[in-house]
Structure formats: C-alpha cells, structure tokens
Image (tube, rainbow, N blue to C red):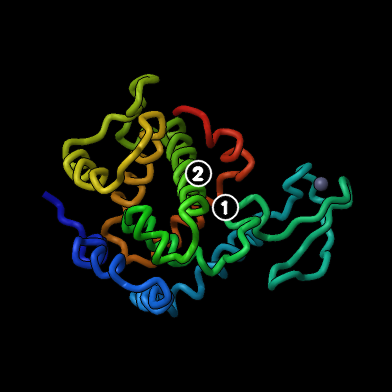
Amino acid sequence: MIKFPLSYKRVTNRSLMRTILSTKYNKRPSLRQSYIRYTDAESIKTLFQKLLASKQASTIACPHCSSSHIIGHGRYRDRQRYKCKSCSRTFNDYTNTPVHRTHYPDKWIPFLKCMVQGESLRVSAICVGISYVTLFYWRHKLSRAIQLFLDYQIHTHTDGYLPVGIHPPRYVVSEMESSHFIFWIRHFNWIKEKYLGRYVSWFRFVFSRSKNVLVETMTDFLLISSSISIDQTYRTIKSVS
Ligand SMILES: [Zn+2]
C-alpha cells in the first residue's frame, strides 16, 4: 500500500480542529498566519508569477471574442490590462481564470493549501479567513475545473481510466485509489451525490501528485484549473456530472 508523504497528511486531525475551534475569534488571524507560514512562503510567492507567465506565454487573445488584435491598457492592482480592438472590451491576465473577480488573490494561497490537503469547509474557512459561502463557491469552481480537465484527458488518451457510463461515480477507481478515497471523503459532510464526480476528480488530482511537494501541487492546481475557461466552468457548475 502506498502511503502519503508527510506533507499530505491532513494537518486537520482532531487536536488541531479542537485548537482552532477553541481559539477565540479575535485570536484566529494569528492562527491563520501560522497556517500560511507552515507552507513554503518563498516558493509560494512565485505561484501567481507562474500563473501570469503561463498566461503571457500563450498567445494573448481576447477572452470575449477570441480576437488577437490586442493593445496594452495600463495596469490595475499589479495586473496588466488589455483592450481588444475588435470588441473594445478590456481584460487582464487573470480574466477567464478562477482567480478573476476575487478581491483577495492572496487568500488563494491558504485556500489552495486547504484544497491540496483536503481540509474540511469548517477549518478551511478559519484558515483562509473567508466566509463559508465564498469558500464553498471557490471549492466548486476549482473542483469543477479540475473535473473538466480530467474529462478532456480521458477523452484524448485513456491513461488507464475509462468512463463507465452516466451514473456517478463515472470512473473506475482503482482498488488502491478507492481505499484512500474512502478515507479522504469521510472528512466531508453533506456532499450532494450529484457532485460526487467532482470530488472524485479533486481527490484523483491530488492523489496522482502525492509524491510531489506541497507547493508543486498547489501550483499545478492553480495552473491547470486556470487552463480551463472559467466561462465553461460557470456554465456547468450547477450541472449534474
Ligand atoms: Zn474582443
């Protein structure tokens, strides 16, 4: 049986859970700081730079009309803005990625860490410092994008996994995966059955990278989910699959 490297073990064991929940509300920000410090802060600094580099490396096209007649349009909050000469609409490097329209991109770092470690919603909300509602939405946005990405992979090359029909869970999970999956999924309460497919994808994505270091997986999580058009994610986020 393959064991998760130490960094993948949930830090959210019962004692940490107890510590967090017993900490007075006004003391929780410092707890958040220590949570962020736990990760390799220096490496994480480059996480968004990598996202920008991946966006800029691909030929810049208008996310609204796909035109390549683009001109620079100043900067806003450290983001390069562009204007499309065909449809006159503006966009920036984060447009069409899950990070777009989030007011606090820095919160994505602890959030990604919580995603990689499969933290519960309750603990994640405290560690990230955002409301349940926002966090729940971010989680679905990201897991849906990962699901779309894995779907494309399955359709382009089988990679050992075959879609087995329309009934969830849609994929054959290997025996080794399933024993870890059962352990992993127990951590979440209240999963709607119709969303099980995206939880499977989320698990599979992290599991397939369990030999990586934490920061690498966080980076992958962000870059790969950003490679899926966020419009497509929004269109299908409520759909059953
Ligand atoms: Zn355009």
Instruction: Check the image and report above or below for 214 versus 42.
Output: above
Q: Which residue is mark 2?
A: 145
Q: Residue at x 56, y 33 (%)?
A: 236
> Of helix, strand and loop, which one carries label 1?
loop
Near mark 2 (Cα within 10 A), the count class, few <14, some 14-19 or many ≥20, is: many
Seen from the viewer's position, the closer of residues 134 and 214 is 134
Q: Residue at x 40, y 64 (%)?
A: 126
- For the question of whether residue 138 can be seen, the reply is yes
**Do the residues bearing badges 2 and 1 touch, measured as CB atoms within 8 Å?**
yes
The tag earlier along the polypeptide, 2 or 1, is 1
Q: Residue at x 44, y 45 (%)?
A: 143
Look at the numbered disc 2 and say if its residue's Cβ is closer than 8 Å to ligand 1.
no
Seen from the viewer's position, the closer of residues 188 and 79 is 188
Among the 4 quarters of the image, the one containing residue 173: top left
- For the C terminus, the quadrant is top left
Q: CA distance from mark 2 to mark 1?
A: 9 Å
Q: Which mark is residue 98?
A: 1
- For the question of whether residue 40 can be seen, the reply is no
- Count all numbered tags in the image, as a single digit: 2
Instruction: Check the image and report above or below for 240 versus 28.
Output: above
> Of helix, strand and loop, which one carries label 2?
helix
Q: Which mark is residue 164?
A: none
| 75 relative to 105 in the view: left or right | right
Three-letter amino acid code at the position of disc 1: Pro
Image location (x, y in percent) of residue 72:
82, 64
Three-letter amino acid code at the position of disc 2: Ala
Image location (x, y in percent) of residue 35:
36, 73
Among the 4 quarters of the image, the one containing residue 31: bottom left
Instruction: Check the image and report above or below for 62 versus 32.
Output: above
